[in-house]
Image (cartoon, helix red, strand yellow):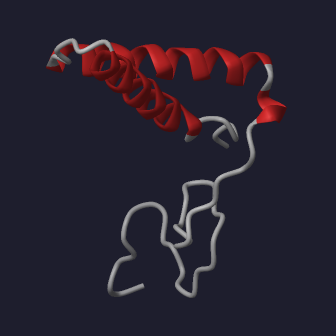
Amino acid sequence: MTPVWFPWIVVGGLIFVLLSFVASKYKQKEYRGIQFLQDFISGSILIAFVGVWMPDIFPKMELPIRFLSVTGEGDSDFDLQVGPPRLAGR
């Protein structure tokens, strides 16, 4: 099972990019492409550390579409065959 804070890594990275972009425009400096990647990675690492230390502060994010997962969660109306295919004569 993935941690509750795991999807927040992307959100943290995007927030860092947005804040850095606004700060560079406020200071009337150029915002280069490499800064986008650096800020996204920095925000992602910060959120990952906070998520490990304080996982209860992040609310649970749920997708509107329910996906089948490896753990068997989700609604399924079909049987899943595991192993080699059955022989036709048996």
Query: Which of the pair 41/87 is nearer the observer?
Result: 41
Label count reads 0
Q: Residue at x 63, y 79 (%)?
A: 75
x, y percent for residue 81: 48, 71
Where is residue 48 shown, x and y percent of the image?
60, 21
Residue 66 against residue 84 in the figure, above or below? below
Quarter of the rendering containing residue 14? top left
**In-image side of 60 versus 30 (left or right):** right
Depth check: give the residue in front, 68 or 50.
50
Q: Is residue 65 left or right of residue 85?
A: right
Q: Is residue 38 left or right of residue 56?
A: left
Residue projecting furthest to the right: 56
61 vs 30: above or below: below
Residue 67 screen position, x and y as percent: 52, 67
Q: Residue at the location (21% across, 12% down)?
A: 29
In which quarter of the view is residue 35 placed? top left
Location of residue 83 with respect to 77 vertically, above or below: above
Q: Quadrant of residue 20?
A: top left
Q: Percent x, y for residue 32?
A: 16, 16
- Residue drawn at point x = 50 percent, y = 38 percent: 11
Quadrant of the image for the C terminus? bottom left
